[in-house]
Each structure stands twice: as C-alpha cells, then as structure tokens.
Image: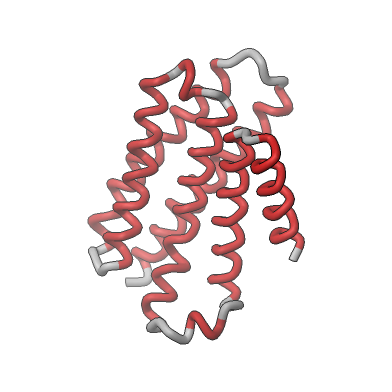
Amino acid sequence: GSIIGLIFYILLLAIKTKQLMYYSYCLLGICNLLTILIHQRIPEPIIALFSQEFITDLSLVMPIFISAAITQYIIVFTEAYKFKKTITKLLLIYIATIFVIAALFLFGAPIKNILPAFSIANIIATFAMLYLCFSQNKFPRSVIAMLVIGISMPSLSGIITLTLALTSI
C-alpha cells in the first residue's frame, strides 16, 4: 500500500512539475511494485490466466526491468541526455537490449544463450552509469554513494537471478 501511495504522489509531482526525473522515478516505482506483486502472487485472478511456467519466467524477468528503470532514472537524474550524448545512446541501447533479452527469455530462448549477452551488457551499462555519477561534481558524496548502491544492486540482482535460473535447468 505504501509503495502505491508513493508512486501516486510521485506521479502527481511529475504531472504538476513536468520534470522528467519524477516520471523516471515513477517508472522505477511501478517496476518495483510489479516485481513485488508477481513474486507474492497478489494479482491471483490475473495470474490464473497464465501458465505456471510463464509466471515463473516473468518473476525471473522482472528484476531486469528494474535495471532498465534505474538506467532511465540515472540518465535523467544526471542530465546525461544533455551533456553526455554518447553514453546516453549506449544506455538507451542497454535498455532496448533488456527488453529483447526479456522477450527472448519469455518466449523460450535458452538462458545459457541469453545470460552471457545480458551479463556483458549489464557490466558495460553499470560502469557507464557509475561514470555518469562520478563525472559530475554537482552531487555530494552521500548522493553519489546512494546512486552507486542503487545502480549496483539491481544489476547484481539481474545477473544472480538469471544465473540461478540457469543452474535450476
């Protein structure tokens, strides 16, 4: 309930201020909320429409979407789209790669083929996001520390989740 309230509040801020950062943060909140709902099997009537295998695959893919949402948030928060256009393009390619990898996984592509591509893309994107955070002197160290944690955790979570899925096959 509190996450829904926070998302609604951020959405109202986004509509009122028209700042991209709030929209990006709202997207991140929605991805987190969907991940929690799917892992907790809360929307049971909707889940019942799909096979158990698809729901399991979807629960493995959702952390990857959090990585995409954080990437979008970092692009907007650091204003990379204004000053670091090459890195912004690289990170947008990473976001597109995440959607392709998720689609491939959900449609049955072998995870042993997907994991190396995702891992390499994830490592490159993580370093690019860290560069964006450290290259701008406008942030205090505490903000940079929080951004580093925020960037690192979903990236590691995505790799660990896919690796665990690979070992369970």
> What x and y, as percent, mark residue 27?
56, 49
Q: Which colour style is shown?
A: secondary structure
Q: Which residue is more in the foreground, 163 or 86?
A: 86
Q: Quadrant of residue 44?
A: bottom right
Q: Which residue is found at the position 46% from the left and 45% from the top? A: 68
Residue 13, quarter of picture:
top right
Residue shown at the point (43%, 75%) measured from the top left: 55
Rendered view: 79 above or below 70: above
Residue drawn where x is 29% and y is 48% of the image: 116
Along the viewing direction, whichever of 38 and 109 lies nearer the viewer: 38
Number of numbered discs visible in the structure rendering: 0
Whether residue 101 is situated above or below residue 55 in the rendered picture: above
Where is 138 relative to 168, above or below? above
Work out which quarter of the rendered image holds the C terminus and state it: bottom left
In the picture as drawn, the residue positioned furthest to the top comes out as 137
Which residue is outermost to the front? 16
The front one of 164 and 157 is 157
In percent of width and height, residue 12 lies at 70, 47
Drawn side of residue 116 relative to residue 15, left or right: left
Instruction: Give the quarter of the figure containing the N terminus.
Output: bottom right
Residue in view at x 74 percent, y 58 percent:
5
Pinpoint residue 162: horizontal percent, then vertical percent: 39, 59
* Nearer to us in this view, 91 or 10: 10
